[in-house]
Image (cartoon, helix red, strand yellow):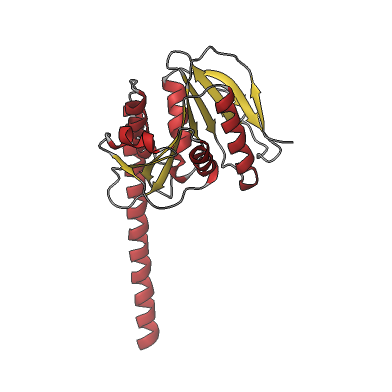
Amino acid sequence: MAVKFNILAKPKLRNPVLVEGFPGLGLVGTIAASYLIEKLKMEPLGYITSDQFPPLAAVHNRQPLYPARMYYSTKYNLIVFVSEFVIPISVVNELAEKIYEFARKNKISKIISLGGIPIKGEQDEVYAISSLPSLIPALEKIPSVKIIKEGATTGVTGMLLAKGAVENYPVISLLAESHEGYMDPKAAAMVLDVLRTLLRFELDTSTLEDEAKVIDSKVKEALSKAKSAHSEYKKVQDEASLGQMYG
């Protein structure tokens, strides 16, 4: 079975923005998209299915849901796609094509993809890529944003950017510096701060920032314990070696 968009509602939107948040580094896309859906009180638009997707259901507030879903807001003139599983590589091209077709059919003004990129220094920058040069000036005006000039981007976002560049369609990718080993709500807050500046709407990301502090504290505590345990193990190992040497 091919990728299928199962539409449940027909909202009246006028050239809305489509935000895509799929899992990747630090789960930034999924966290950011889910936060948008919750805080903006978005309504269900539908869900995405494919025989290439993993057989699972997400459960939120006691309700089972398809893990790849679509939401909308008439107030904010916004559509959000979110997935709670990593998109299988076998279906990336087809899903990108379906999103692009959906965007064309529904007169989407632009597609904005949210994700993460490995931290290079302090966690304070959001990197941006655009399919059109005309979109760059607005991005450059945002202090935390750095435009990517060379590199590569993969997955659904990469396919959308490449197609948008060829067909002169507006696609933007926002990639917050993120940790690789665990989910990163701070990076999600960073990318949402850029998004709200671009789209000019209010969004309080303090909850995400508080979650980030808790996770950061727990990670530091775990690393400290691991380092301490390693030191103790090394000490015991050295003493055992000395005992064997001089036994």
Q: Eyeballing the image, is 71 above or below 118?
A: above
Residue 60 in sight from this viewpoint: no
Residue 57 x %, y %: 63, 31
Q: Eyeballing the image, is 245 above or below 185?
A: below
Answer left or right for 9 relative to 37: right
Residue ID at (54%, 40%): 163
Q: Name the quadrant containing residue 68.
A: top right
Instruction: Return the residue nearer the eye: 219 or 111.
Output: 111
Residue 60 x %, y %: 54, 26
The residue most toward the right is: 1
The residue most toward the left is: 143
Report the number of discs: 0
Instruction: Return the residue nearer the eye: 13 or 65.
Output: 13
Answer left or right for 240 relative to 72: left
Residue ID at (53%, 31%): 82
Residue ID at (35%, 88%): 246
Instruction: Return the residue nearer the eye: 91 or 83.
Output: 91
Q: Quadrant of the C terminus?
A: bottom left
Residue 55 in sight from this viewpoint: yes
Instruction: Return the residue nearer the eye: 130 or 226.
Output: 130
Residue 169 x %, y %: 49, 33
Q: Name the quadrant containing residue 243.
A: bottom left
Residue 107 x %, y %: 53, 22
Q: Quadrant of the N terminus?
A: top right
